[in-house]
Image (cartoon, grey):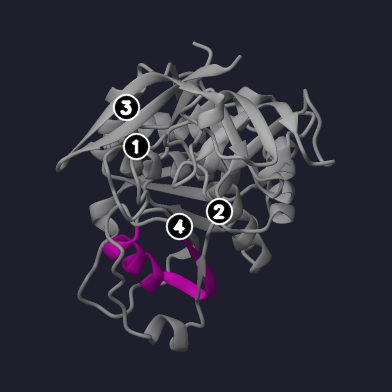
Amino acid sequence: MSTFKAMVVYEKGEKFERIIEEKNISDLPDNEVLIRVKYSSLNYKDALSATGHKGVTKNYPHTPGIDAAGIVENSKSDKFKKGDEVIVIGYDLGMNTPGGFGQYISVPANWVVKKPDNLTLKQAMIFGTAGFTAAMSVDKLIKYGTKKGGKILVTGATGGVGSIAVSILAKEGFYTVAATGKLSEENFLKTLGAQEVVNRDDIIDEKRPLLKETWDGVVDTVGGTILSSAIKALKYGCSATSCGLAQSPKLDLTVFPFILRGVNLLGIDSVECSIDFKEYIWNKIAKEWNIEFPEGFYEEVSLEGLNEKIDLILKGKIKGRILVNLEK
């Protein structure tokens, strides 16, 4: 095939328009590995790129999609051969390099991970960057000494990262508390493995510098006052991971939790971490963290069905994951 279908975002004055159109393979960058994309997924960052956020994507027209799983069509690298099933997430994919919302991508070889044998391409993209980030968060909590059975708070629990973090933590034997503004989704969260579901507003306290020691660990996906309140309620020597800013990038804290309770704030970056580390996390996902998600956890859409979902994820109205089938 010399042509393929892709979502292309055009900048038209102060507005941005999303169009599904035919592109030529020759339009792609001249990189080492050409991949026929089978599946992608929708992330918050994709929605920002698709609506003209210049902090994510500088130049338009552009094809978003920070996730891609597919089959190698051509490789200039000895690491990969035609027919290999591979995963690409992070780095510049879908930001300023044409991404997974197109049926083909062309990327450097050092962005590509061979798909583990016991994980399908579809399963890989149900996880996607969100699931990868959740797995990184749990892995880091464990490495910083978080004890099995401990009480772990997950914020933004109905979102992609939060929902998968709930499932991984439950599988690892932690007592998982899901914080959400969507209490109507309590049954959904308990199906994923949450032992408790709390209203996110009930854990916020902006006034006191320290709160009652409550959490043995925190996986935060939203930032702002929710994260600062969670840090203030960590038990002595415990840790919180931070990977998102959906509420706010600001963090209003005193140093008291750090110098009086010795707590840790652990940053999570799934974009620029090494390819070796990505292989390590994907293998953990494929083996001990390969979760069978309940019915309704993800919705599968075509490229044409993405427009509506992009608008919804920006409004915080998506639960679980949106899987993009590039052959649908």
Q: Gap between marks 3 and 2, in whole Å?
A: 23 Å
Depicted 279 relative to depicted 152: above or below = above
- Is 238 one of the magenta-colored residues? yes
- What's the amino acid at mark 3? Lys
Q: How many marks?
A: 4
Q: Earlier in the sequence, mark 4 or mark 2?
A: 4
Nearer the observer: mark 4 or 1; the answer is 1
Crowding near the residue tagged with mark 4, few <14, some 14–19, many ≥20 C-alpha atoms within 10 Å = many
Where does label 4 land, which residue?
Answer: 243
Q: Is residue 56 left or right of residue 30?
A: left
Where does label 2 land, which residue?
Answer: 270
Q: Position of residue 88 (x, y in %)?
A: 62, 39
Where does label 1 land, which residue?
Answer: 61
- Is 227 one of the magenta-colored residues? yes
* Residue 297 in view in this figure: no
Q: Gap between marks 4 and 2, in whole Å?
A: 9 Å
Mark 1 and mark 4 in contact (Cβ < 8 Å)?
Answer: no
Q: Earlier in the sequence, mark 3 or mark 2?
A: 2
Mark 2 and mark 3 in contact (Cβ < 8 Å)?
Answer: no
Q: Which residues are magenta?
A: 223-243
Nearer the observer: mark 1 or 3; the answer is 1
